[in-house]
Image: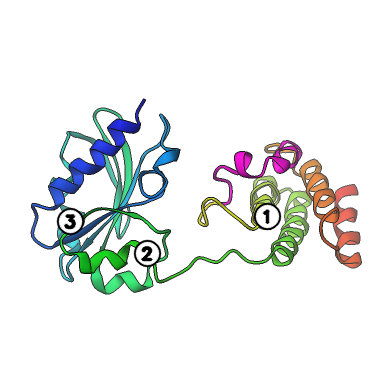
Amino acid sequence: MRRKELLERMDQIGRSVAKHDGTLMLLALGSIGLETDRLDDYSDLDFFLIVEDGHKARFIDNLDWLTVEPLAYQFQNTKDGHKIMYEDGIYGEFAVFEVVEMPGIAYTPGRVVWERDEALHAFATPNVVTDVPGAAYCYEEALTNLYVGLLRERRGERIAGHQLIQVAAIDNVLKAHGELSDPFNSTRRVEVRHPDVIRLLEQGVLGYGRSVEAAAAILGYIEARHPVNASLKREIERLLEA
């Protein structure tokens, strides 16, 4: 099982960053962080490297601190970090932040792999809390996603309609359930945490060209749980029947 390899790779990176000037903390997130009970053969590395002010560019531009094993792939996907893969197939995503940036960064609490000073331990818990809006707000957003998505669909913009109906509306319905295993991605582990929505996913995520059918299923699901404005419902149904 890959669990042991992932944990060891994270520790290797921790030992490596400890040797570099300007490094302050290596913070593991997600399943490699505080939720290691979730680690399995399909997990990867997700972490922050926190550095002294003025040192960020050095650790983004030069990945020598990551070469605890040979890197086979690296891609800088944001101004803050990279996506990487080692030759043995271990994949990871990371960001580098300076101390001055940390108060404004939203993330879930993490596990300290290495820190230069215990006084830095507060960085393991974010100052910015990512809130999930209430169920009523999410359902209303989903209803407008359905309406505008159907407008796009009937105009012939089928992929645009698909995105609003089978992606955005579904995302908002999932958020309406409140507790999310990942506040940044409502689809993560939803089948395990909310098995009651599996039927909705089977009926509401049907693929390109089937957005009208999907929208009808999503509307029915929402109606059973949330009052739907009569005028908005009438217009959605008109588009469903067009």
**Residue annotated with mark 1:** 177
Residue 148 x, y percent position in the rendering:
74, 59
Q: Is residue 143 above or below residue 153?
A: below
In the image, taking residue 130 as reference, residue 31 lies left or right, namely left
Query: Can residue 36 be seen in the rendering of this structure?
Result: yes
Q: Which numbered disc, 1 or 2, marks the residue that appears first in the sequence?
A: 2
Residue 44 x, y percent position in the rendering:
37, 39
In the image, taking residue 158 as reference, residue 17 lies left or right, namely left
Q: Which numbered disc, 3 or 1, marks the residue that appears first in the sequence?
A: 3
What is the image's colouring? rainbow
Q: Quadrant of residue 13?
A: top left
Badge 3 density bin: few <14, some 14–19, many ≥20, Cα 10 Å: many
Q: Nearer the viewer, mark 3 or mark 1?
A: 1
What amino acid is found at the position of numbered circle 3 in the picture? Phe
Residue 51 x, y percent position in the rendering:
19, 63
**Residue annotated with mark 2:** 125
Q: Which numbered disc, 3 or 2, marks the residue that appears first in the sequence?
A: 3
SS category of the residue bearing label 1? loop
Residue beneath the point at 70% across and 67% down? 137
User: Main SS type for the magenta part?
Assistant: helix
Q: Nearer the viewer, mark 3 or mark 2?
A: 2
What amino acid is found at the position of numbered circle 1 in the picture? His
Residue beneath the point at 76% across and 55% down? 146
What amino acid is found at the position of numbered circle 2 in the picture? Thr
Residue beneath the point at 68% across and 50% down? 170
Q: Which mark is residue 59?
A: 3
**Alpha-carbon span between mark 3 and mark 1:** 39 Å
Q: Is residue 202 magenta?
A: yes
Q: What range is drawn magenta here?
A: 186-204
Residue 52 x, y percent position in the rendering:
17, 68
